Image (tube, grey):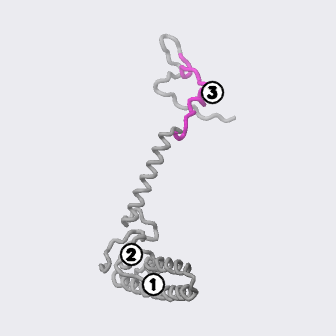
Amino acid sequence: MAKNPAAPASNDAPSDGTVLNGVPVTGKGRATPSRAEQEAARKRPLVPDTKEAKARARAELQAQRDKARVGMAAGDPRYLPARDQGAQRKFVRDYVDAGWHLGEAVMPAMVVVILATFIPVPEVQYYSFVALWIFILFVVGDMVLTSINAKRAVKAKFGADKIEKGLGWYAAMRTVQMRFLRLPKPQVKRGQRPV
């Protein structure tokens, strides 16, 4: 069986050949602890198991989440997900948020149609669905126009060779969200186009 090289003696432990109080000392000068003593010394909880520690950890996690949520809503780049990061994405967000879009009214229009289905007149139900589909066609047209115009504005500002992929879709999807539900929150007022 191979032996490991002997570990160097510590400064406070006497080495072989040392005389202590006139008596020669060999070895380390103390008893080797038993395995049970070594295991008992090692036993300690890896994570404190107290209620206070758990409550403190929960409070810290909640504080971090709140900070991240507020940071994301404010548009702080440190807290934005990858899909919202970058100067071009911020420009597109500001471009979309500066205008009025039909897509913002899709959810209220659907609520109106649902309420119209409770009216026991078949003509009202039928025409409300037809009106909703016509409105959705206009919303899709607005999404396409916003997408094209946002990409043109990005090309004019950042140059045609440095355009990120997916900016048109990013702009179109932001138009169908109601303004107060958008994340990150709008940073510009309506009519205040970014330059």
Q: Dot 2, crowdedness within 10 Å: few (<14), some or many (≥20)?
A: many
Which of disc 1 and disc 2 is earlier in sequence? Answer: 2
How far across and how far down the image is residue 116, in percent? 52, 81
- Residue designated by label 3: 36
Q: Residue furthest front?
A: 120
Q: Residue at x 59, y 29 (%)?
A: 40
Is 104 magenta? The answer is: no
- Residue designated by label 2: 93
Q: Residue at x 56, y 87 (%)?
A: 126
Give the CA distance from mark 2 to mark 3.
65 Å
Task: Identify which amino acid the numbered label 1 is placed on.
Answer: Met
Above or below 92: residue 12: above
> Comparing marks 2 and 1, which lies closer to the viewer?
1
Q: Secondary structure at mark 1?
A: helix
Q: Dot 1, crowdedness within 10 Å: few (<14), some or many (≥20)?
A: many
What's the mark number on residue 143? 1
Nearest the eye: 82 or 132: 132
Task: Identify which amino acid the numbered label 2 is placed on.
Answer: Arg
Task: Identify which amino acid the numbered label 3 is placed on.
Answer: Ala
